[in-house]
Every structure is written in C-alpha cells, then in structure tokens.
Amino acid sequence: MNIIGTGRAHPSLTVTNDMLSTFLDTSDEWITTRTGIKQRQLISHVKLEDLAAEACHNALKDAGISAEDLDFIICSNVVNEYITPSLSCIVQGMIGATCPCFDLNSACAGFIYALDIANSFFKSKSDINHILVVCAEEPTRMCDWQERSTCVLFGDGAGAAVLKRGDDFKSIALSSFSSIDPLYQIRQLEKTPFITKEEFGGPLVMKGQDVFKLAVNASLNDIRRVVEENGITYDDVDYYLLHQANIRIIETIRKSLDQDKVKFPHNIANYGNTSSASVPILLDELNRNQTLNRGDTIVLSAFGAGFTAGACLLKWSKN
Ligand code: UT7
C-alpha cells in the first residue's frame, strides 16, 4: 500500500490561548508550557462533514484521481452530529463517490487503525485499487467549556489520505487494552418505558497524568515493534510523525529514542489536539511544504481513549 495523495481542512475560527483566558482561569503561559498549544481552530458555523469533504477533495486532487476512482472509503470519527448514518456515507455523497464506506472509532489512534484495515483490503480483495481514508473530528464538542483541564487541549479538523496498491507500508502494529477510567465520555440515550437502570451523560472526563503515561508507554512500545520488525534502528528513521496531543508527550518519546528534534515535526502550536485527524493533518502539511523526500523512512504513531494505540513504518515514495 502506498500514499498517493493527502489533504486537510480546518475550520476558519482561530481561538488563541488569550481568548480562552477571558472566560477561563487559565493563561497563555500555562497552556504553552504544559502543552505547546498556542491556538486552535474551532468549528463555529460549518459542519464536520463540510471539513471532511474538503479534506477528501484536497487529497483526491493531490493524488490526481477522482471520486469515481475510489473503491472504498474509511472514515475515522469519534463524534459528529449524526449518530446514523455514518459520516462516511454523508461524505461519500458530498464528494460524488459510489464505493462502499464505513466509519471506525478508535479514538485518536483511528488513522493508524484505518491504514491497517486498508492494507488488509488491498491484500484480500483483488478488485480494490484506491482507498480513501478520512479522519474528521470535532473533539471541542465533547468538552465542558468551563473545565480548563480539558477544553484548552482540543481543536477541530479533518485530514485525509488516498492509498493505492503498493509496498511502501512495511509494518503496522496496533495495540488496545481496556482502560476506560483515564479518558471517557458517556452520552445519555433516549428513554424507553422499560429502562430501569440509572443513566447519565456528560462531557469528556480525563485524568491527564494517567493518559500522559499510557500514551508515552504505548507509543514507545508500538514504535519499537515496527522498527524492530524491519531490522533497522531508531536512527534509520527520517521522520516520526506522532499524534499531536501534547508537546511534552512528543518530547518525552523523542528523548527516550535519543533522536534529533528535527525528526519530530509538530504543529500542535497551531491546531491543538484534533484527535485522529492530527496525524493526517501533519502528514499533509509536510507533504505540501515538501519536507518529505522520496525514499524517506517515516514512522506514524498515535494513541487515544480505549486505550488504543498504533504505529506504522513506511517508505515515502511520493514526489
Ligand atoms: O488524545 C489523547 C488525549 N489526552 C492527552 O493526551 C492528555 C495527556 N495529558 C496531558 O497532556 C497533561 O496531563 C495535561 C496538559 C492535561 C495537564 O498537564 P499536567 O502537567 O499533567 O498538569 P496537572 O493535571 O498535574 O495540573 C497541574 C495544575 C493543577 O492545579 P493544582 O492542583 O496544582 O493547583 C490544575 O488544576 O494545573 C492546573 N490546571 C490549569 N491551570 C491553568 C489544569 N488545567 C489548567 C489550565 N490553566 N488550562
């Protein structure tokens, strides 16, 4: 499997740390030093599907193919306004594709899970030539905006990648282990006359320090697996593109691997944590600003609620 096109879309509203401190007991200094975030793009008047479709259009254009050429669409999404139909079905119609599609929810690790499924499709279905993966997320709609320890972290956005048959992807490692307490959100379903259990819903709940440790451990483990599987060393990797959740998480992983800063490009300062969209958004930035060179060895790694995590190792063959 090869990546032949990337795309992204952001909402137009930029919210700076200073803007947050007008209604929250926080400061630019705290958010910057604890997270690396300076601003984030927030959904205001657009819908998530608009961003998803824009990211898909950009990725298709970059790949030089049209929506009719797609054989499958996989959409990674945690929440959007529709419970049903799936976001992938909505986006399929918006971009004019007719292929089968489905959503997956592996939280912030969704891009890596989608890549693994796409890779398996290429191996098992001979009639599949092009797959579109789109990660579209609005985590800012999950937060309590009076809760400074969560709402300052997130931003909304969409990232997409067009994949075709090939052998650029060398290894993908996924890991999941049930650990709900550190990061969850419960929603209340409609009542029926037969419900007797107590039910409630509420905003995202996070134990930040627990998630921090789980994230570092899971990422390091997944990265080690894909690097070892290829018989190479951490030094042989040109770029590590990590889930953009906290610059301190990225730095802790970088230092553990004893690698140069230049190998860990990041954009968290501009967008915050956009959940599963963060890795494809970063990939698209680096593709478009021509940071990535043909033949580069790249590791992608992400982690999120569940707890879910995954990493993959690929050769970049796109110009
Ligand atoms: O996609 C995965 C999603 N989540 C993550 O990856 C999150 C991983 N965790 C983290 O990034 C960090 O744990 C946080 C950024 C969430 C928090 O950083 P921390 O260094 O672990 O801070 P803390 O939770 O230990 O809080 C330190 C202090 C507390 O005050 P006290 O109890 O020491 O008086 C917090 O109430 O900072 C306070 N605090 C804030 N202060 C100003 C928490 N949020 C804020 C805030 N502004 N926004």
Image (spheres, grey):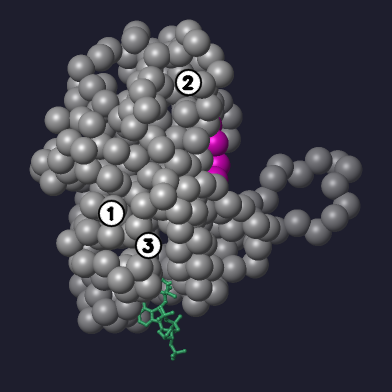
* Residue located 21% across and 67% down the image: 260
Q: Which residue is mark 3?
A: 245
Front tag of 2 and 3? 2
Q: Is residue 47 visible?
A: no
Q: Position of residue 47 (x, y in %)?
A: 36, 36
Q: Label for residue 304?
A: none
Q: CA distance from mark 3 to mark 1?
A: 25 Å
Mark closer to the observer (1, 2): 1
Residue ID at (42%, 46%):
230
Q: Residue at left 69%, top 45%?
A: 189
Tell me: 215 left or right of 32: right
Q: What's the magenta region?
A: 103-108
Query: Which of pointers 2 and 3 lies earlier in the amino acid sequence?
Result: 2
Q: Quadrant of residue 58?
A: top left
Q: Secondary structure at mark 1?
A: helix
Q: Nearer the viewer, residue 66 or 232?
A: 232
Please tell me whether residue 106 belongs to the stretch shown in magenta: yes
Q: Would you place residue 24 above or below residue 160 in this image?
A: below
* Mark 2 crowd level (few <14, some 14–19, many ≥20, 10 Å Cα): some
- Residue most toward the left? 289
Q: Which mark is residue 236?
A: 1
- Badge 2 element: helix
Does the stretch in magenta take in 30? no
Distance from the alpha carbon under mark 2 to that under mark 3: 31 Å
Residue type of the residue flagged with mark 2: Phe
Residue at the image point whose x is 53% and y is 27% from the top:
120
Would you name the residue on which mark 2 appears?
122
* 113 shown above or below 156: above
Q: Does the beta carbon of the residue at mark 3 sit less than 8 Å from ligand 1?
A: yes
Q: Amino acid at mark 3?
A: Ala
Closer to us: 175 or 106: 175
